[in-house]
Amino acid sequence: MSSNSAETVKVAIRCRPLNSKEKSDGRDTIVDMDMKIGQVILKNPKGDPGEPPKTFTFDSVFDPTIPQREVYDSIARPIVNSVMDGYNGTIFAYGQTGTGKTHTMEGAPTPDLQGIIPSSFDHVFETVNSSVDKQWMVRASYIEIYNEEVRDLLSKDPKNKLELKEHKDSGVYVKGLNIFVVKSVPELKNVLEVGKKNRSVGATQMNQDSSRSHSIFSITIETIESGASSQGHIRMGKLNLVDLAGSERQSKTGATGDRLKEGIKINLSLTALGNVISALVDSKTGHVPYRDSKLTRLLQDSLGGNTKTVMVANLGPADWNYDETLSTLRYANRAKNIKNKPRINEDPKDAMLREFQEEIANLKAQLAKSDSSQDSSRPTSGVKEEVVERIVTVPKALDHAFLEQMRQELEAQMRLELSAKSENAKLTEAEIEQVKREAAERAKQEAARLESERLRMEEEAAKIQRKQKKIQDEMAKRAQDAEQIRAEKEALAKRLKAMESKILKGDERGGLAEVTKKKEAELKRREEELERRRAMEAKKANEIAALEEAQLAAEEKYSSKHEEADQKTKKLKKLWKKFQEVNVEVEDMYKEFQREKEDLLESVRMLQDQMQLKDMVIEAFIPPEEVQKVMKRAHWDEDREVWVLERLSDVGRRDVAVPGSSRRPVSASGQRRPTSDFAKMASAMGDMNPRFKSENILNLELDLPERTTYDYEGPGVDPRVQAAINAAFADDGELLFVGNGEA
């Protein structure tokens, strides 16, 4: 049964211990925590000795001694339980860089040190395995927002930029995102590890493994009752586990180059998140700027929407982080006033569990159909198929030698018969000739008979061979069909098994379910006890405030002027103290505003420098008419948040038609080719550099290379040798100088 009652965002504060660098530098701890009343006390290291510390109250606070498991049981377990019931839930870690956000969310790969994300994996599958008469489907995805670009950390190309889209039913989603169905805790951890390898990290002076992007690990859980009393309703909850990149100041991180640009983008997105929180808290603001950042668009449901949300603000306890710690506490203090309206997501349109069930039923029907068709194709009982092979001997063709032999045999037989009739009298020539003729005639008749018999036998053999071939072809086809049916059946069975394995069922044996139920009952009892204690503490705080009000009202009755003066002096001192606290708060907020303003101005200055450099390059190298063409074609895409160049045909349809606009564009008037303003200006001022006559190139001074040679200096020649040489060549009217003439 869904609930539309509003509830505020739960905020927890976690403080890390001093790190080794802070200890070696002798830093002091300025953060104290009272976990009983959920209070954080922050001391100003640069404040006056009498300045009171700042106090903030939250739903939960955790000092450095609290283990990971207790943090999870206190703030994350109720959210995961709600997600298993069909609510949306979000847990995100916020804070300055190096304060332990990733440690809180991911932790270390040991049972005692694992963070909220891996602990939620165990929790989800404990609930699944202990359920009875329920079917589950668990899906996971992992994305990061790097420099305002949404990336899929589970993609084959994790650097590929994805687009954000919005659906009227499901809200904001990432187009083309990979979502994997998982069946166990190891599979979920494998998805997490694959994504972590692709995540953008870098080293700064404050953190050697600083996250340079915001990451969101999402687990979608669908469930349906499978018992006899089930009505077939599907519930779907989505758990967003968000590890935000830390806010940072360049003076402390020492970031330059790409790290500086990353830090600027991180701070801008966190500023946009702060503006969204401020707008949600301020009842006078009608517009909430979700579209100012990709982060705020993705967290739109988590802030003021259909989600149960927990924010874990991480602090650094060192005195040199006072400004950042104070800013984080104020940030979290505003966030706890946001009101969400969570409800159970029942029978959503994008549920995959229903699709899987329909597909499984379809596969089972196909398997049953294939079994029935295979049974019908088999021979009925009592009838046997028999294949009879018959061997047919085909007589050989009659050749000349065979006919001659047969004629001779008949001739010999006839001679014997005639000899017997004539009582051994010798045969005459005429009788012999007659015998030969009759033998030949009989041999011819016998040969004709044998030939006709041979032809008949060949025809019969051909018929039998055709029949045998037909039977063999039918048997081969039947075997092929049977093999194809068997392969299709195996494929269907394999697919069915894979589909059924993705739908999880609880442990019906009772052992694990009983143990898990006992643990859940114990945790629920502890949660109820914790809530009861919080309610009692809040009640006591209200009673104390009421008593103070009653005391102030009672102090209005005085017995004398002196007593009235004393009481009013005490009251004035209390009010003066509160006034000083408010003044200090206002001054701190003004300083914080100035710091944020300076950071934003520094970002603006850097962007202006880059823009001026690009403008100079455009003016020097691109003709102005070409620039106008590009500006005319360019338009801003609100969904993708990028500039897009339209096709010329689209520009023509968008603008008003101009006569002659379809003509081919001509070159620049008076110029051989398009020329930049810089070249035109140089030519007008009399600069006859040949580069400006027809080429669009800057007039740059050539960089002279460093000299790599030396002047030749020959060996020195003795003056006496030089004088002798000169005397030898004096008659020719020439003088020969050797070397440089130096001794």
Image (cartoon, rainbow, N blue to C red):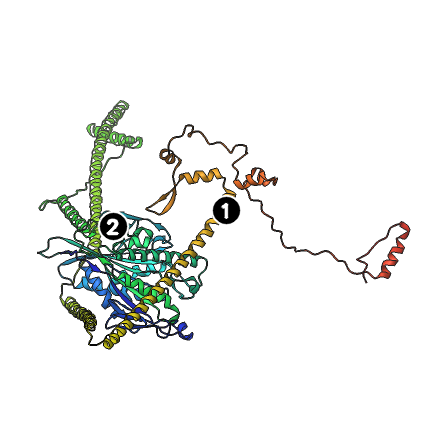
Which quarter of the picture shows residue 594?
A: bottom left
Q: Which residue ends up furthest to the top in the rendered image?
A: 430
In primary-sequence order, the first of circles 1 and 2 is 2
Classed neighbour count for the residue bearing mark 1: other residues with Cα under 10 Å, few (<14), some (14–19), many (≥20): few
Amino acid identity at mark 1: Met
Q: Depth check: 607 or 221 in front?
A: 607
Q: Please identify the quadrant where the C terminus is shown.
A: bottom right
- In the rendered structure, the answer to whether residue 658 lies left or right of residue 502 reads right
Q: Please identify the quadrant where the N terminus is shown.
A: bottom left
Q: Which residue is mark 2?
A: 171
- In the rendered structure, the answer to whether residue 723 lies left or right of residue 551 reads right
Q: Which label sits on residue 36?
A: none
Looking at the rendered structure, the secondary structure element under dot 2 is strand
Amino acid identity at mark 2: Gly
Q: Can residue 614 be seen here?
A: yes
Percent x, y of residue 479? 21, 45
Q: Depth check: 191 or 453 in front?
A: 191
Residue at 85% from the left image edge and 58% from the top image edge:
722
Count of marks, rendered view: 2
Marks 1 and 2: which is nearer the front? 1
Residue 140 lies, with reference to residue 583, above or below; the image says above
Q: Which residue is mark 1?
A: 616
Report if the CB atoms under discs 1 and 2 are less than 8 Å apart.
no
Percent x, y of residue 473? 22, 40
Residue 567 lies, with reference to residue 440, above or below; the image says below
Percent x, y of residue 134? 15, 58
Give the Cα separation between the discs numbered 1 and 2.
Answer: 43 Å
Q: Depth check: 567 or 602 in front?
A: 567
Which quarter of the picture shows residue 554?
A: bottom left
